[in-house]
Image (cartoon, rainbow, N blue to C red):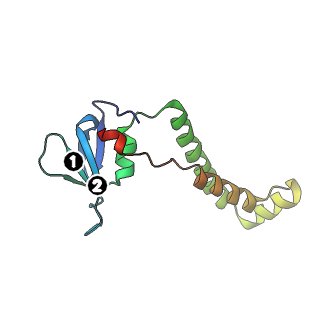
């Protein structure tokens, strides 16, 4: 994973920090809640910053995504939008599509949801950040 230098990373609730100055991310396990998801360790502060975003979301913002990763994220977003649109189709129109065009809305919704779920981004190894 390549960290893009000088990139401002959103930590939540109006907090931003430079990507190349973040040296560690630790998920908060006790007293976790709204506004308390991750401790962000920086090179310039002796204490961690409490972020409202998950360590995975922060790490993804820090990294320089390849073109292929960007295309995968875009494809997942489009499939998610398609699921939303298909689930809004009224029952009468679903029956009409099934009978007249042999288009099974429910089958497509299931297939798209499964594809979006299985096409998730692998959790990157954070040890690469500190080595």
Q: Earlier in the sequence, mark 1 or mark 2?
A: 2
Q: Residue at x 18, y 52 (%)?
A: 48
Residue 8: image location, x then y, percent: 28, 37
Which sits in the foreground, 77 or 44? 44
Packing grade of label 1 (10 A; few <14, some 14-19, many >=20) is some
Q: Residue at x 53, y 42 (%)?
A: 73
Residue 113: image location, x then y, percent: 63, 57
- Disc 1 is placed on an element classified as strand
**Side (left or right) of 16 relative to 78:** left
**Side (left or right) of 56 relative to 45:** right
**Side (left or right) of 96 relative to 74:** right
Q: Residue at x 52, y 30 (%)?
A: 67
Are dots 1 and 2 in contact, CB under 8 Å?
yes
Q: Residue furthest bottom?
A: 31
Question: Which quarter of the image is occupied by the C terminus?
Answer: top left
- Disc 2 is placed on an element classified as strand
Which sits in the foreground, 79 or 97? 79
Q: Residue furthest right?
A: 100
Location of residue 62 (image quadrant): top left
Which sits in the foreground, 21 or 17? 21
The disc at residue 41 is 1
Q: Residue at x 83, y 60 (%)?
A: 98
The disc at residue 107 is none
Residue 28: image location, x then y, percent: 28, 61
- Residue designated by label 2: 26
Q: Residue furthest left?
A: 46
Q: Is residue 61 above or below residue 85?
A: above
């Amino acid at each position: 994973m390549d960290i893009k230098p000088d990139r401002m990373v959103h930590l939540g609730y109006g907090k931003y920090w430079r990507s190349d100055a973040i040296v560690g991310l630790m998920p908060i396990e006790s007293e976790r809640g709204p506004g308390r998801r991750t401790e962000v360790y920086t090179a310039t502060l002796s204490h961690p910053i409490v972020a409202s975003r998950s360590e995975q979301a922060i790490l993804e913002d820090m990294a320089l995504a390849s073109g292929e990763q960007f295309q995968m994220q875009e494809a997942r977003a489009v499939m998610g939008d398609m699921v939303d649109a298909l689930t809004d189709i009224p029952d009468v129109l679903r029956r009409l599509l099934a009978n007249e065009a042999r288009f099974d809305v429910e089958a497509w919704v299931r297939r798209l949801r499964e594809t979006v779920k299985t096409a998730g981004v692998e959790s990157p190894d954070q040890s690469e950040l500190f080595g």
